[in-house]
Image (spheres, grey):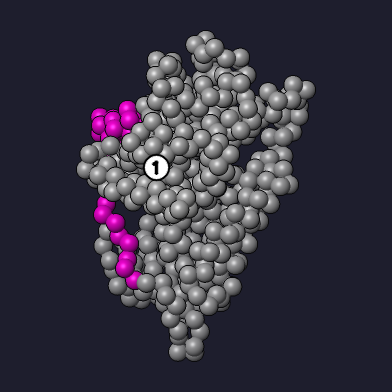
Amino acid sequence: METEKIFLEISILLVLSIFSSKASLKLGIPSLILFLILGMLAGSEGIGRIHFDNTWGAQFLGILALVYILFSGGYNTIWENVRPIVGKGLSLSTIGVLATALLVGIFAYFILDLPFLECLLFGSVVSSTDAAAVFSILRSKKIALKKRLGALLEMESASNDPMAVFLTIGLIHILQQSDLSAGKLIFLFVKQMGLGLILGYVMGRGLVIGVNHLKLEYKGLYPVFTVSSVLLCYAIVTYVGGSGFLAVYVSGLVLSYHNSLHKRSLRQFHVGISWLMQISMFIVLGLLVSPKELLNIAWTGLACSAFLMFVARPLSVFISIPFVMTFKERLLISWVGLRGAAPIILATFPLMAQISGARIIFNIVFFVVLSSILLQGTTISKLAKMLSLQEELKESTQTTLDETATHSEKGDEMHMIELSIPENSKSIGKEIVDLKIPKEILIVLITREGQYLVPSGETVIQTDDKILMLVNKNTVKEVEPILI
C-alpha cells in the first residue's frame, strides 16, 4: 500500500496546487507562495504529516526541474523581441549574477557564523532571478511591462541560472579541494560555458531537423521526442565537462528561432512541463524545511533577504547596465529580481556535498524566496504604474486552429506554422503578391493588433504581424528568407 499512498499524496498536492494557482489570481498573491505553503502544510510538522528528508531525491528532482524550466525559457523566447536587448540581457545574467553573489556573500559574512567561502556560496545560490511569478501577477491585473523591459527581464530570468550554477558548483569544489587555483577555476568556467554554447547550438539544430524531417506517425510522439532530446542534451554536455544547463537553454533558443513544425503545440506542452517542475520544487521546499529550525534564524534570514532586495540587486543592475537604460527602467528592473525555483534547487547542492553550513544556507534560502515573492511580487504592478512603465495587457490572440496535418491536392502533408514579423523585416510595407511566396505555401490568417485578418494578395505586411500559414516539409525552410 506504500506505493498507492505515495501516488495519492502526490496527486492531491498537484491538484491542490492547480486550484491554488486559480485562487492566486483573485487574491493577487503569487501562486508560488501558495505552492510553498501547501508543501509546509503537508510536511512532517504540518497537517499532512508527510516525512520527507531525502536530499538526494530533492536534488535529482531539482536538476530535472531546472533542465526543463531552462529549455522552456529558451523555447518560449521570441527572438525578434530579444534581439535588441541581447547585450543588456547577457550583462545582467553574467556580471549582474556575479556582483549579486559577491555583495550578498560579503554581507552574510558579517551576520552569519560561517566561513567566508561558505557565505560566498550562499550568495551564489541566491544570485539568479525568476520573473515567472511577476508576469503572472501582471497578467492577472491586465498590465504588461513595456516591450523592451518585458523582453529583457524574461531573457535575464531564463539565462542567468547557468552562471549561478557554475558559481555554486565551483565554490563547492573549492571548499572540498583546497588546491583548486584561480587559474583552474577560470579554465573550468571557459570550458563549461564554451561547450555549453557550442553543443547546445548543435543539439538545437538537431532538434529542428528532427522535428521537421522525422515524419512521425503520431503527433503525440513529437513532445516525447523533444522531452527525451532535452534530457539527452543535458546528459551529453555535462558528461563531457560542459554546462548542461546552458546547453539546454541554448537548444531551446535555437529551436525557437528556426521555423519548425508543431511549434505552437510543443511550446504549450513545454510550458506545462515547466509549471509542473516549478510546482514540484516549491512543494519539495515546503516539505524539506523545518518550521522549528526556521524560527531560530528568522531575523538573520530576513536581514539577508532585505539586503538582497534593497542593496545587492539594485547595485548589480546599475553595475551591469550603467547608462544604456533610463534610471526609471533600471529601478524597475532592480525590483523585479524575484528569487524562485533556481535558488531552491541550488540550495540542495551544498546539502548533498555535506558542506558544514549547508543546513543554515538552505533555511535562509527559504526566507529569501518567501520574502522576495511575497514583497516584490505583490508590489511590482504598483511600482510599474508609478514609474509609467506599464501598458495595458492585450487579450490573447492565439488562434483555435489545430495543427493536425492536412494534405494538399498532390497528397503532400501540410502543417500549420506561425511566424512573427520583426521590425527589420524586408517584407514590411510590401503586398503579399509581391513577396514571391511559393504557391505550395498558403497564408491562412494574419493577427494584427489583436485583430484577425483574412489576407488577400493586396494585404500589406506590417511590423509585429503574426502570420499563420500552411507549409510542407519541403517549403518550411523557404518561409524565413522571404518574410524575415
Mark 1 crowdedness (10 Å alpha carbons): few <14, some 14-19, many ≥20: many
Q: Position of residue 160 (x, y in %)?
A: 53, 37
Residue at 52 percent across and 10 percent down: it is: 110
In screen coordinates, is 465 left or right of 391?
A: right
Residue name at image x 37 percent, y 72 percent: 402
Q: Pick the residue in front: 320 or 180.
A: 180
In the picture of the structure, the residue carrying the numbered disc 1 is: 132
* Looking at the image, residue 210 lies above or below residue 104: below
Residue found farthest to the bottom: 410
Q: Is residue 407 magenta?
A: no
Residue type of the residue flagged with mark 1: Ala
Residue 198, position as x, y percentages in the image: 67, 49
Q: Is residue 110 above or below residue 375?
A: above
What x and y, as percent, mark residue 393? Answer: 27, 47
Magenta span covers which residues?
373-401
Residue 400: percent from left, percent from top: 31, 68
The answer to whether residue 7 is above or below residue 96 is: below
Residue lying at 39% horizontally and 37% vertically, measured from the top left? 49
Q: Note whether residue 191 is visible.
A: yes
**In this picture, residue 209 sits left or right of residue 20:** right
Q: Which of the 4 image quadrants contains residue 56?
A: top right
- Of 467 and 156, which appears nearest the observer? 156
Q: Is residue 381 magenta?
A: yes
Q: Residue furthest left?
A: 26
